[in-house]
Amino acid sequence: MNQNRHKEARQILGRVKRDEFVGRSAELQRLVSHATGSGRLENAGHRDAGRGLLVLLAPPAGVSELLRQAYDELFNNREVVPIYFALPETETTAVSVAIEFLNTFLLQYVAFRRDEPSLCRLSLTLNDLVQLATAADLPWIEDLVEAYNRQRFGRDDRELVRFCLNAPNRVPPHYGRPFIILDAVRLANYSDSPVPLATEIVRSLTFSNLPFALAGLRREVLDAVARAGGNVTSLEVMRLEPLSEEDGRNLVTSAARRHQVVINDETRDLLVQQLEGSPFFMSALLQSAREKNLKLESYLACERLYVDELMGGRLHRYFSSVLEHVAPEPETRAAVVRLLCEAAPTGNRVASIDAWRKRLNLAGVEFEQLLRALHIQELINWDGEMVDAAGASSVWKDYLTSRFRLDALREPRALVVADVMADALKRAPQTVARHYRRAASPRLRALLGQFNLQRVPKRLFDFAEFASVYKGAAPEEVAAGLDADTELLRLPQVFHTASGVSFSPQLRQFGEESSVVAHAFEGLNYTDANEIVWLVAKVDSKLEADRDLTASWLDRLEGLARQSGFLRTQSWLIANEGFSAEATELLREHNAYGSSQQQLEVLSARLSEAAGATQPSEEANEFTLILPMGDDNELLAATTVEQIARRLNFSPEAINQIKTAIVEACINAAEHSLSPDRKIYQRFRVENDKLVITISSRGIVPPNIQGHIEEKRGVQLRPDDNSDEAQQRRGWGLKLIKTLMDEVEFERVDEGTSLRMTKYLRKSA
Amino acid sequence: MGKTLKSNVRSHCVGTTAVVYASDYLNKLTGERIERECKKQLDSGARALVIDFSDTELVNSIGISILLGIIHIAEKNGALVVFSDVNEQTVHLFEMLGLTRHVVLAKDEQEALSRLSTSPAQSQTIGH
C-alpha cells in the first residue's frame, strides 16, 4: 500500500531540485514506475515485479542525476526501498567495490526504515548501522554483519564479492522490498579486475527476485549481460538518447538560471546544437561559466569558454580520463590519438584490424582490450575485423585535434588555442543556421520513412511537369489539381533510412542531412525483385539547379550505389527552385526524379495528411467483425454491411453492390489462404461521404491473388477451359469487386492479405 | 408436376422444358445443386432449361461460374437456357461477367416458357 506519508519532494541524493531537473522527465517516470510495478501490464502479476531494467546510454551522456532523482522520488513515495550505488570514479578492486556496496545498501536501507534521509549522506561503519537499525530489522542485520565478518577473512575474493552484492536478498519479506539502482557507467574501469565485477554484478541482479535498474554504457552493459549468460530479451530496456532540441533548450535555460549565468536565445540554441544535446556537456559548460563568473551573451563568449573547457576544463578532464583508461601507456595513447586524428579528415575512416595493430605495435590481448575499450566508449566501431574511426561527437573531435597538435606535432599552445577558437567561431553560425534550416524544412529521412506504398501524383517527382501546370498557382489550386491528377506514382515501402554520409563519407562535406539512402520494397512482397534503394539528395542551389550541378549529384549517388553494391536504385534530387530544362533532360536520361522544395512540401503534407487519416478520429464510426471462414458466413458480413450502408443512405443499388463485393472479398479471404486461424477480419469505417471496408485474413497470398496485388496481370473475364476452375472464380471475384467499388487496394500486411474497399456516397444516386 | 423436397432444388417440367428454381443465395453449394438438377433433367430428355431467380437476392462469383458451366452442358446437349425473374443487380453482374451473351433473359417463368415455345430450336427439338 502506498502510505504517501512524505509526498513532499525531499531532496536526498539529487543534486538539483526536482523542479529543476528537466529533460528526462519521461525516463524518470519510467524508472519510478518500473520500481513500483505501476508501469507494467496489469496482468503481469507479482512474479514479473522482479524484472530488471537496463538503462543504456551512449557516451558521454550522463545518467547519475536521473538515477539520483529516481532514488529521491522512490524514497519519498515509500513503496519500495531504493538503494542507489555508483561504481567509484577512482579505480579500485572488485572486492572493495563490493564491500562499499554492502555498506551503502545497509546505510540507505536503515535510512529508509527510519525515514531519516540525512543518514544517506553520512559515512557510517557497519557497526554504526547495527546500532541504528530499527528493532524489527536488528536480528537480520546483525546476522548479515556477522556473516560478512566471517566471509571477509576467507580466501575466496569472488565469494566475498558475491556475498556483498547479494546482501539485498537477505531482507526478510514484508520488511521493505529493495530496488537496486546501480550506476555502472564506470564499469569499464574494472575490466582488468581478477574478480570479473561486471559478471558478478549482472548475475547478482538478474538471479535475484528483486527489481533493479542497471545503468551504463550501452555497448558495455549489453556485453556484460551476454557474458554473464543473461538474457537481454527478458529485461526491459530504456535507451537514453541525446536530449531533444526542446529538452536541450529547457535544460540550458534551467541550468543557467540555477547557476545565475546570463544567456540569451541565440547562445542557448548554440550550446544545444554545438554540444549535440549532451546533458553532461551542457551542464559542464554552464557550471564552468558560473565558476568563472562569465556571461554567455555572445557566440564569442561561448566559444571562448568552450575552448577553455576543451583545453583544460571539465571537457578536457573527461576526455583525458577516457583516453587514459583506454590506453594507460603514454606511448600507446599518443599512437591512438594520432590514428584517430588522421583517420577522420582524410575520409579513410575504415581500416583493417591489421593496419591498426601495426600502427599501435601491440600484442594480441592488449591490442584487443584497447580496441574493445575504444569501442565501448564509441570512439570507434569495431566489428572484429574492421575498425571504423567515424562517429563520436564533434566535441570529441575538437579535443582530439587539439591534443594531437599539442602532443604529437608539438605546436605552440597559443597557436592551437587560437586556431581551435577560430574554427569554433567560424563554425558557430553554420551550426545554428544548419539547425534552423533543418527545423524549417521537412526532414528528408523522416519523409522517406513515411513512404508506405501510398499513391501520390507523379508530378510531385517531376519538376518540369509540375511547373508547367502549377507555376504561379495558389496552394489551393495546386492541391485541387493534384487531387484530380490521375497519373499516380506508387511509393515504395521504406524500411530503413540512413544519411548518405553513412555510406559515403565524401558526402559529409554537404552535411549529414543533405542526402539519404532509403532501403525499400516496391509492391507488397518482400522479394529480391521488389527490393530497391532510393538515393535522395538535396541540391544546394538558390536558382534552378543547372545541368552541371545535377550531373555532379547524379554521379555521387550513382557512385554510392556502385560502391555499396545496390542492384536496383531510384535517384531523386531536390533543389529549392527546381531544375533547369537541361538539368531536367539529364534527370530523365538517368531515370531520376527531380523535385523542387515546393513539391517536397506538398508531398510531405499529403503523406502526413494520409497518415493522420488512418488514425481513428472521434467522428469516425468504426465497426469490426470477426467471422469464422465457411458456413456461408459471408452472408453475415453482407447483412452487417447492409445495415451500416443504410445508415449512410446509400441507394439500394449501391447497397447491393457493396454486399456483393464484400461477399467476394470474404470468399477470396477464405480460399487458398491456408489461414491458420480460419477467420476473416472485417472493419467497416463510416466517414462523411464514404464507407471504407477492410477485409483481412492471415495465411499466405496465393500467386494468382499476387498477380492482382501487383497489378501486373489482367483479369480473365471468360473462363479458360484449360485453367483451374477455382482460379477463374477468383479472377471473377476480384474483377467484380473492382467494378462494384470505387476504390480497391490491397494493403501491406506481413502475413495474408488485407483488402481495402471504398464506396463513395453519391447523393444523386 | 410435383416439386422436389425443400432441401433439394425445386424444379418441374413443362413438356420438354425443365424449370429449376434457384435459392435466395446462389453460391457454390446451391449452384452445384442447380447444376446437378439441370444435368438430371437433361439426362431425362429435357430440351430446354429455365432457371428461375425469383427467390434469389444475392449471387457470388462461384455461383455464376457454375451457371456458366450449366450453359456449356446445355449447349453440348443442344438445349436452350433461359434465366427468368433475375433482379436488376444480378442482371448487372451477369452482364459484367459475360453470361448474358449465352442465355436469354425473361421477365418471369411464363415469359420464359412462352419464348421457348416460339423458339425455332425448341420447336425443332419438340418436333423430334
Image (cartoon, coloured by chain):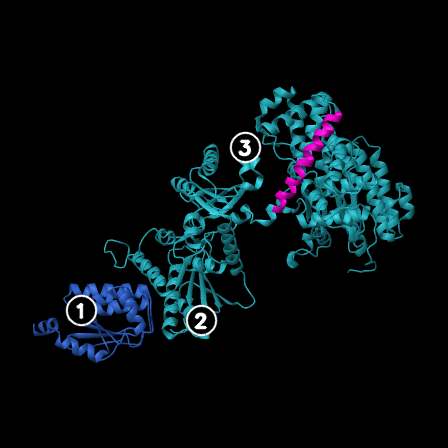
Q: Distance of mark 3 from mark 2, alpha carbons?
A: 60 Å
Residue A659 screen position, x and y as percent: 39, 69
Q: How many discs appear?
A: 3
**What amino acid is found at the position of numbered circle 3 in the picture?**
Gln
Number of the label disc, if any, that sits on residue B42: 1
Q: Chain of mark 3?
A: A
Question: Disc 3 designates what residue?
Answer: A506
**Chain painted cyan:** A
Q: Which quarter shows the C terminus of chain A? A: bottom left
Q: Which of labels 3 and 2 is toward the front?
A: 3
Residue A98 screen position, x and y as percent: 79, 37
Query: Which of the 4 quarters of the picture holds residue A284?
Result: top right
Q: Is residue A660 visible?
A: yes
Q: Is residue A9 left or right of residue A471?
A: right
Q: Which residues are magenta?
A: A413-436
**What amino acid is found at the position of numbered circle 2 in the picture?**
Thr
* SS assignment at label 2: helix
* SS assignment at label 3: helix
Q: Check the image and report above or below for A622 versus A250.
A: below
What residue appears at the point 78 percent right and 40 percent down from the top-left corner?
A86
Question: Disc 2 designates what residue?
Answer: A640
Which mark is first along the chain, 2 or 3? 3
